[in-house]
Amino acid sequence: MSHNVSTYTGISTKGQYVKLIWLLTVSILMLGVSVVWFYKEYNPEWKQHQRAVIKKKISKAEESFEFWSNPEWGDPKKAKELEGKIKSLKGSKLKIKQILLKGEGLWSNQENGHR
């Protein structure tokens, strides 16, 4: 007495595979959307921008440090100051910075003030 699964459920085997394929497709799409959402949530554009700005400031400070730390013509006081600046830039944490604009910038007028 062998009975097929389709006898009990009323669904053919082919129909079961089609449903399984749709389930897998929707699951993979949901996983992809979740991965993109997670990436955007924990790596927003402002953090990327601040990392780039800080990296640029560090490279400029290191160039100045190399110049001022030269024993022939350098200034040890300025070199020490630049060394502290480089350490503080490397240890700086990323944070949201609010820019206040001067003038009458009203959202109701759909305008911003001047910087």
Image (spheres, rainbow, N blue to C red):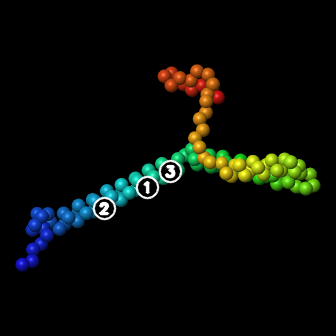
Residue reaching furthest to the bottom:
1
Kindly identify the residue that appears in the image at 59 percent across and 43 percent down.
Answer: 95
From the viewer's perspective, tell me whether residue 74 is left or right of residue 112.
Answer: right
**Secondary element at tag 2:** helix
**Quick check: marks 3 and 1 in contact, CB under 8 Å?**
no
Say if 31 sits above or below 105 in the image.
below
Graded by Cα atoms within 10 Å as few (under 14), some (14 to 19) or many (20 or more), the crowding at tag 1 reads: few
Please tell me which residue lies in front, 61 or 87: 87
Q: Residue 35's mark?
A: 1
For image coordinates 9% across by 77% down, the residue present is: 2
At label 2, counting other C-alpha atoms closer than 10 Å, the crowd grade (few under 14, some 14-19, many 20 or more) is: few
Residue 18 lies, with reference to residue 96, above or below; the image says below
Instruction: Specify which label sits upstream in the sequence, 1 or 2.
Output: 2
- In this view, the mark in front (3 or 2): 3
Q: Amino acid at mark 3?
A: Tyr
Q: Nearer the viewer, mark 3 or mark 1?
A: 3
Mark 3 to mark 1: distance in Å? 11 Å
The mark that comes first in sequence, 3 or 2, is: 2
Q: What residue is pinned by disc 2?
A: 24
The label number, if any, that marks residue 42 in the structure image: 3
Residue 10: which quarter of the image? bottom left
Q: CA distance from mark 3 to mark 2?
A: 27 Å
Q: Is residue 88 visible?
A: yes
Give how far across and how far down residue 105 sits, in percent.
56, 23
- Which residue is painted at 92% across and 51% down in the image? 73
Amino acid carrying mark 2 in the image: Leu
Q: Nearer the viewer, residue 53 or 76?
A: 76
Image check: 20 left or right of 79? left
The amino acid on which the numbered mark 1 sits, given as a three-letter code, is Val
Q: In this rendering, is residue 107 above or below 14?
A: above
Query: Is mark 3 in CB contact (under 8 Å) with mark 2?
Result: no
